[in-house]
Image: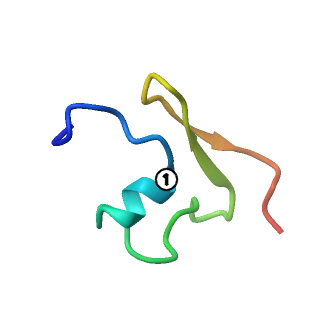
Amino acid sequence: MEKHSFPKSVGDLEKEGYLKDGRTTCPNGNTVKIDADGKVTEVKGNNS
C-alpha cells in the first residue's frame, strides 16, 4: 500500500512495524499466508 506493492510475507509486515513482534499468527494458533496477489489466507491445521 504505502510501498505500492504487496508484502511478500507476514514477516515483512512485522519488520515494517505493521504487526507487533511475535503477533504473526491467528488467535487460534494457525498461521497466515500472503500470496503473490496480496491475498491473505489462514493455513489451517498447523497449530500445536
| Residue 3 at x, y percent in the picture | 20, 40
Give the quadrant of the C terminus: bottom right
Q: Nearer the viewer, residue 28 or 22?
A: 22
Name which residue lies at 47% across and 40% down: 8
Q: Is residue 37 above or below residue 15?
A: above
Q: Quadrant of residue 29?
A: bottom right
Is 17 on the left-hand or right-hand side of 24? left
Name which residue lies at 65% across and 63% down: 28
Q: Residues within 10 Å of mark 1 (few under 14, many from 20)?
A: some
Give the quadrant of the N terminus: top left
| Residue 45 at x, y percent in the picture | 82, 50
The residue tagged with tag 1: helix, strand or loop? helix
In this view, the residue farthest toward the bottom is 21
Name which residue lies at 57% across and 59% down: 26
Q: Is residue 18 above or below residue 9?
A: below
Q: Amino acid at mark 1?
A: Val
The residue wearing badge 1 is: 10
Q: Is residue 21 above or below residue 42?
A: below
Name which residue lies at 38% across and 65% down: 15
